[in-house]
Amino acid sequence: MNFVLVVDDSSVDRSLAGHLLAGHPEFHVEYASNGIEALELLEARLPLAVITDIQMPEMDGLQLVEAIHRHYPSVPMIVMTAHGSEEIALQALSLGAADYVPKAQLAAELRKSLDTVLALATGERGHQRLWHCLRRQELQYELENDVKLIPPLVDELQQVATQLGLVNHNERVRLAKSLFEVLRNAIYHGNLELSPAEAALAKSLSPEAAAVIARRNAQAPHCDRRVHVRAVFSQQEARFIIRDEGPGFDVSTLPNVKADPSHLSGTGGRGLVLTHMFMDEVSFNPAGNEVTLVKRAPASA
């Protein structure tokens, strides 16, 4: 199900905003206590909109607005602040926010602001009935080595799987986690051939991490490589084939996760371990540069 993300370090204000938005027929509300936590959630799946406070520890609302606008431009943002300052409102709008609501006016204005922003962002929604007629859909993508392309791609694939009834809300999150991990591995370990230490660094948001990625992306043959994604959907299953253009790896070294779940406690390859646990099938080609993930429809009662 679609959701709206409320970001505020005050539990009281988070609850107030959530209460004002509760009961909407098209989404539920999820929460984050600061900007860093919000960005972690956006890595897995994109909300319909983000509603954020300004004054927060670790990463404030203006920094969050700027980061979302840069990395997830399709997600509209509404800023709320206790200060009511026109200067802060203008700054937030200049950084990419779609609207601004003073906290003193939340009860009167927040719901109206969100409804307006969502209507402008999503346009007409009249296609739901068509999903019941869909029997098969195939999508193909060719990605550059930019992990910022992963969340919108995962979100699009999730939507198709959800509409076809292949995943419910909880399984949607697990599907997103699996796809995100495999796609990121295809870029970091496959195309860019980062070492485990370099890949761990690349997963942070530090300038040093960005420099590592930029340096490798500027070198041949890494700069010319792409990640190829093929997704085939039917009413019985979703099949995702993800191939990088790297040298691959020895697939015989992979752990048998379901036979020995103790691998979950390790740090190396944790994403692949979780993928094996979340998906119905995970298989590699002999070269080790292509993985196929299968998610089947739940059994009928």
Image (cartoon, rainbow, N blue to C red):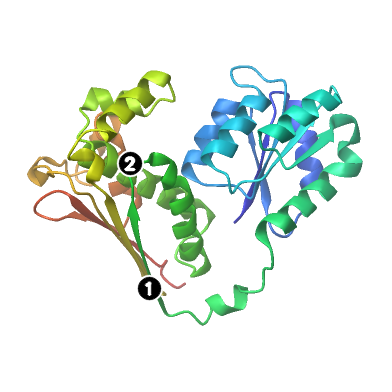
- The residue that appears at 57% across and 44% down in the rendered structure is 73
Residue depicted at 9% across the width and 54% down the height: 286
Task: Judge by depth and name the residue closer to the eye, 279 or 127.
Answer: 127
In-front residue for pair 125/279? 125
Q: Residue 113 location in percent, x, y?
A: 81, 47
The answer to whether residue 60 is visible is yes
Residue 8 percent across, percent down from the top left: 70, 28
Q: Is residue 34 visible?
A: no
Residue at label 1?
A: 236
| Picture coordinates of residue 195, whole percent (x, y) | 20, 27
Numbered disc 2: secondary structure: helix
Instruction: Give the residue drawn at x 22%, y 27%.
Output: 196
Apparent side of residue 183 relative to residue 249 in the rendered image (left or right): right
Q: The N terminus appears in which quarter of the rendering? A: bottom right
Amino acid found under the numbered disc labelled 1: Gln
Instruction: Determine crowd level at label 1: few under 14, some 14-19, many 20+ residues with C-alpha closer than 10 A.
Output: some
Q: Which mark is residue 184?
A: 2
To which quarter of the image does residue 104 belong? top right
Q: Amino acid at mark 2?
A: Arg
Q: Which is closer to the viewer, label 2 or label 1?
A: 2
Q: Quadrant of residue 63?
A: top right
Q: Camera-side residue: 99 or 163? A: 99
N-terminal of the two: label 2 or label 1?
2
Q: How many marks?
A: 2
Estimate the spatial distance between the alpha carbons at disc 2 and disc 1, rounded to whole Å: 27 Å
